[in-house]
Image (tube, grey):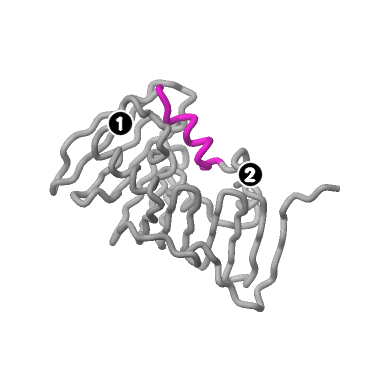
């Protein structure tokens, strides 16, 4: 979300949610799905929530710079929540809310997928029939799912998803068209039943509220 980036929100953790949304939506590459892939997506279709600690590394191929982020993440079929770097971000499909503890403020905005570089819809533009998918055995009884595309308009050239023996995402590695590399590892991941209060910010009453939602003039 460019408007959130301009307000100082760290965008790199949002890539994680976008990646998972992309590869778990039920309408994607349905003809090529594999058993492990299907089982993973089914959990989201059933309303389960995946929660985990994460470590995310972004490597810029042009500058050589890297950025490391750590935090916690919760992902459902249509919403996600990320905690890290003194910030909490919640997206429910219609509204985005970000709490910045360092500034004690909440930014509320309409969630506009067209303005989110890592929104599910935009990610799905790349993960379609242009991708080939393969499933191979990995180390420690894990499964490795690889998606590759030769389409220059796809978001990513190669994506590798490692699923552990319990069917949980363990690692996602991706290379985009600019050769930037993204690696996300999940620790303590598990699927849990949804909680009505899970996707709440619970910010202090003293927090400043900044509402950027579009209004009719």
C-alpha separation, residue under disc 1 versus residue under disc 2: 29 Å
The residue that disc 1 covers is 33
Q: Image point 35% across, 46% down: which residue?
A: 183
Percent x, y of residue 139: 14, 45
Q: Image point 33% across, 42% down: which residue?
A: 173
Mark 1 or mark 2, earlier in chain: 1
In the drawing, does residue 95 fall left or right of residue 188? right
Q: Secondary structure at mark 1?
A: loop
Percent x, y of residue 169: 30, 49
Most prominent secondary structure in the magenta stretch? loop
In the drawing, does residue 93 fall left or right of residue 126? right
The region drawn magenta spans 117-129
Q: Secondary structure at mark 2?
A: loop
Q: Image point 38% across, 38% down: which residue?
A: 23
Q: Image point 70% across, 67% down: which residue?
A: 209
The residue that disc 2 covers is 112
């Amino acid at each position: 979300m460019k408007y959130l980036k301009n307000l100082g929100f760290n965008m790199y953790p949002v890539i994680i949610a976008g990646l998972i949304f992309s590869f778990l939506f039920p309408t994607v590459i349905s003809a090529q799905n594999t058993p492990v892939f299907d089982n993973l997506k089914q959990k989201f279709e059933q309303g389960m929530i995946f929660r985990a600690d994460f470590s995310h590394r972004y490597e810029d191929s042009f500058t050589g710079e890297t950025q490391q982020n750590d935090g916690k993440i919760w992902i459902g079929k249509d919403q996600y929540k990320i905690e890290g770097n003194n910030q909490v971000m919640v997206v429910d499909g219609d509204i985005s809310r970000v709490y910045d503890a360092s500034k004690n403020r909440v930014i509320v905005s309409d969630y506009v997928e067209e303005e989110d570089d890592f929104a599910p819809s935009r990610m799905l533009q790349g993960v379609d029939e242009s991708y080939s998918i393969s499933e191979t055995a990995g180390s420690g009884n894990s499964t490795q799912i690889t998606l590759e595309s030769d389409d220059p308009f796809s978001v990513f050239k190669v994506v590798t998803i490692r699923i552990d023996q319990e069917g949980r995402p363990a690692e996602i590695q991706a290379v985009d068209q600019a050769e930037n590399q993204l690696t996300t590892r999940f620790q303590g991941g598990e699927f849990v039943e949804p909680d009505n209060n899970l996707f709440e910010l619970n910010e202090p009453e003293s927090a400043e509220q900044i509402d950027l939602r579009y209004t009719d003039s």
